[in-house]
Amino acid sequence: MNQPLTHTVLSAENEIFTGRGGVSRENRCRGFIPAFYDTHSCQAIVSRFANGAPAPLHVLEGLPEEWVVARDKSGRVAAVKDFVIAGFIQHGRFYTREQAAQAVSHYWVTRAQESEEREGNGVSDNESRF
């Protein structure tokens, strides 16, 4: 059985995916929005604060009550069901952290190749923008 999704799990995932494009601060510029996915119902939900405002990172507090399995002493969400995963939505499609990291990595590699091609043709990045 999998473990419930908690703040500790989210922190561990952030450590694993930092530098690879699988965290919000590294993929936001590519249009990825922090989200959660219920693997049983196939429902994806944008990460939100408790007040309903979209969150710029993964926040458990705004998830549906039926996903919540534990709250802390102050009533804040401490854990959600083990079949809920953190990821991202881009253009209406859910991406796991690994998929988002791959997509961002592909973007970085493509940009580097394009830059090398321009430099090989004697065109600098600054000149290619105009």
Image: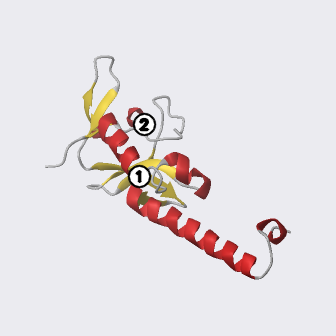
Q: In this view, does 127 lie to the left or right of 109?
A: right
Residues marked 1 and 2 touching at CB (< 8 Å): no
Is tag 1's residue or tag 2's residue first in the polypeptide sequence? 1
Crowd tier of the residue under label 1, counting other residues whose Cα lies within 10 Å: few below 14, some 14–19, many 20 or above: some
Measuring 28% from the left and 17% from the top, which residue is drawn there? 73
Image quadrant holding the C terminus, namely: bottom right
| Element type where label 2 sits in the image | loop
Residue lying furthest left: 1
Q: Is residue 9 above or below residue 21?
A: above
Indicate the position of residue 74 as horizontal and vertical percent values. Answer: 33, 17
The answer to which quarter of the image holds residue 43 is: bottom left
Residues at marks 1 and 2, CA–CA distance in whole angstroms = 17 Å
Q: What residue type is labelled 1?
A: Phe
Indicate the position of residue 119 as horizontal and vertical percent values. Answer: 74, 76
| Element type where label 1 sits in the image | helix
Indicate the position of residue 86 as horizontal and vertical percent values. Answer: 37, 48
Crowd tier of the residue under label 2, counting other residues whose Cα lies within 10 Å: few below 14, some 14–19, many 20 or above: many
Q: Label for residue 85?
A: none
Measuring 41% from the left and 52% from the top, which residue is drawn there? 17
Q: Is residue 20 left or right of residue 125?
A: left
Q: Label for residue 17?
A: 1
Measuring 44% from the left and 48% from the top, which residue is drawn there? 35
Q: Nearer the viewer, mark 1 or mark 2?
A: 1
Q: In this view, does 85 lie to the left or right of 114?
A: left
Measuring 35% from the left and 47% from the top, which residue is drawn there? 13
- For label 2, the residue is 59
Indicate the position of residue 108 as horizontal and vertical percent values. Answer: 57, 65
The answer to which quarter of the image holds residue 121 is: bottom right
Q: Judge by depth and name the residue closer to the eye, 91 or 123.
A: 123
Count of numbered badges drawn on the protein: 2
